[in-house]
Image: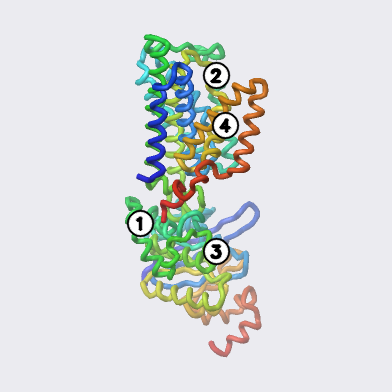
């Protein structure tokens, strides 16, 4: 296990201690922090490791939210619904990936962007199943107390974050991760040395989708009510990319740090500049990317650099 | 000698441009075939077509007893067709060692990263890059990157090796070194098809020469016969060259 991976696990451990220090607000923030980190770590598998700029995060987030919501309304338990949504997303993404990932660069970005729009329209029109534009109510899970509920969903999201982080680390250190790094650097040369690029990219896309869908499912159960414009929001596609860029593309530790930093900035800016918060946030992001183009990990390149491990 | 590769009436066009016209060519096991011709003749396209990068529009390609006309690039690589690129294609962020390890790793399903890296060291040593194993490929000189390409190709344990202008852009000492390497490979019994503009190298190394011109094969045979063939002189070598070499023939 590399130092960066240990640091990432310690970081997640610190987040786990959050309930000791605060009430409902801290738990809410912690839940969102975990969710953001899940989205960013997942995006990093296809965007950071393989170098394919996917804008499909919102599509799989919404897919997971709706799949879980519909299944729970059919009487299934939360856990079963979330697992089924994640598996369905994995298969769906792997199949779509085999087609979409033949496009490169901007073309892939646009195609993946349209995926969320397509799913949103489908959900909007399948009124009988999803409630369409009216949204979907989701049964309460525990219903013990407000704080108990908050605690439950915080730990659910945290557990999923841990699983996502372990997946990201396993991929980074495996033959799959090595192959994705080859694809990112030179796809032509990759297939020339016998790498089945379509298979590798599809697996990466599937892995990046399934944890996002699970996060969407937990989110849906957490907020009890979802509608298409909420869970298929394009911001769910854009934010993970910004987080990954802020933290350091390709490094799971960096990406997780980026997610927490992003949430911190978002929260501080929102509280202090409520009327111009998106503008201020945008400015901060631009400044960060200008002055720290390789993200937070570049601050300690010697300690956490991902290139050093291949010597 | 038995046949390892056969192209039968292979054609390939890119919309209006006919890059290969009904090429029929056989390569025998263990030979070193020189593929020459003017720029744009279709030499690299021919290699791309065999390796599945730009599949043939018509005709058939047989390799090692199997029909590979419609094969995908990575499948071609796993069957033992390996190549170097005219314009070097390293994994720029990787070290030289990992570049070669990637080739060993993915050309054989089931290979582990650890054993691939071990094997990679031997190939780097063979091409004289062992001292550069830990350097990132982007920092190597052109001559080194050309040799890195060769090490990558060898790590795939090729049955048939395509060398696409391995000497282009090298100085004469480097060319000599590369030529020695090719001789050694041929000595190991690897079948080689090389695209090369330096006639000195072609005549030094190749046991047979095939000439492409406008996508068609215009000559194929023993080196001395081919370079005195009037059609080849007309299309590629030029009168002066033929004159100079007539005496040696």
Residue under circle 1?
B116
Label 4, secondary structure: give it.
helix
Residue found at the far front of this picture = A21
Alpha carbon separation for disc pair 1 and 4: 38 Å
Residue under circle 4?
A238
Q: Is residue A86 left or right of residue A267?
A: left
Would you say the residues marked 4 and 2 are in contact, meaning their CB atoms lie under 8 Å apart? Answer: no
Q: How many marks?
A: 4
Q: Which mark is residue B86?
A: 3
> In the rendered image, which quarter is residue A138 located in?
top left
Asked whether residue B159 appears in the rendered view, the answer is: yes
Nearest-to-viewer mark from 3 and 2: 2
Q: Position of residue B222 (x, y in %)?
A: 49, 78
Asked whether residue B67 appears in the rendered view, the answer is: no
Label 1: chain?
A: B
In the rendered image, the quadrant that contains the C terminus of chain A is: bottom left
At 38% across and 64% down in the image, what residue appears? B159
Label 2, secondary structure: give it.
helix
Alpha carbon separation for disc pair 4 and 2: 17 Å
Q: Observer-nearest residue: B82 or B226?
A: B82
Label 4: chain?
A: A
């Amino acid at each position: 296990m590399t130092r960066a991976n240990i640091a990432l696990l310690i970081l997640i451990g610190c987040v786990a201690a959050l309930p000791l220090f605060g009430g409902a607000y801290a738990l809410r923030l912690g839940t969102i922090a975990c969710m953001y980190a899940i989205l960013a770590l997942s995006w990093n598998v296809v965007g950071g490791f393989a170098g394919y700029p996917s804008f499909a995060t919102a599509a799989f987030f919404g897919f997971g939210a709706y799949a879980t919501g519909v299944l729970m309304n059919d009487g299934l338990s939360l856990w079963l619904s979330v697992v089924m949504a994640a598996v369905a997303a994995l298969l769906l993404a792997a199949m779509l990936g085999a087609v979409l990932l033949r496009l490169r660069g901007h073309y892939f970005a646009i195609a993946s962007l349209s995926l969320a729009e397509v799913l949103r329209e489908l959900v909007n029109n399948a009124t009988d199943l999803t409630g369409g534009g009216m949204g979907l109510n989701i049964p309460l899970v525990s219903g013990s107390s407000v704080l108990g509920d908050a605690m439950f969903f915080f730990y659910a999201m945290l557990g999923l974050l841990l699983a996502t982080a372990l997946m990201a680390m396993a991929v980074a250190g495996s033959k799959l991760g090595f192959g994705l790094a080859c694809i990112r650097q030179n796809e032509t040369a990759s297939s020339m040395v016998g790498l089945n690029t379509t298979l590798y990219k599809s697996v990466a896309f599937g892995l990046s989708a399934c944890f996002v869908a699970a996060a969407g499912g937990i989110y849906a159960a957490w907020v009890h009510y979802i509608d298409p414009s909420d869970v298929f929001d394009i911001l769910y596609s854009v934010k993970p990319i910004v987080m990954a860029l802020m933290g350091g593309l390709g490094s799971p530790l960096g990406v997780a740090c980026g997610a927490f930093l992003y949430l911190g900035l978002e929260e501080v800016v929102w509280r202090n500049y409520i009327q111009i918060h998106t503008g201020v946030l945008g400015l901060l992001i631009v400044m960060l990317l200008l002055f720290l183009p390789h993200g937070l990990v570049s601050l300690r390149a010697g300690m956490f650099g991902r290139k050093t491990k291949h010597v | 000698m038995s046949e390892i590769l056969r192209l039968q009436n292979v054609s390939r066009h890119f919309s209006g441009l006919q890059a290969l016209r009904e090429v029929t060519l056989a390569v025998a096991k263990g030979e070193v075939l020189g593929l020459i011709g003017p720029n744009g003749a279709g030499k690299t396209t021919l290699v791309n077509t065999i390796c599945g990068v730009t599949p043939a529009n018509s005709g058939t390609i047989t390799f090692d007893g199997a029909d590979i006309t419609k094969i995908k690039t990575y499948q071609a690589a796993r069957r033992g067709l390996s190549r170097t690129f005219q314009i070097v294609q390293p994994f720029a962020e990787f070290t030289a060692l990992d570049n070669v390890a990637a080739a060993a790793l993915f050309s054989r399903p089931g290979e582990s990263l650890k054993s691939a890296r071990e094997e990679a060291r031997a190939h780097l040593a063979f091409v004289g890059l062992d001292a550069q194993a830990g350097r990132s490929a982007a920092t190597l000189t052109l001559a080194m990157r050309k040799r890195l390409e060769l090490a990558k190709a060898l790590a795939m344990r090729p049955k048939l090796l395509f060398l696409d202008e391995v000497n282009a852009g090298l100085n004469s000492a480097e060319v000599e070194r590369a030529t020695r390497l090719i001789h050694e490979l041929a000595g190991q019994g690897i079948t080689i098809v090389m695209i090369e503009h330096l006639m000195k190298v072609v005549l030094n190394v190749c046991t047979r020469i095939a000439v492409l011109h406008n996508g068609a094969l215009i000559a194929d045979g023993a080196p001395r016969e081919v370079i005195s063939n009037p059609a080849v002189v007309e299309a590629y070598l030029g009168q002066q060259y033929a004159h100079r070499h007539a005496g040696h023939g």
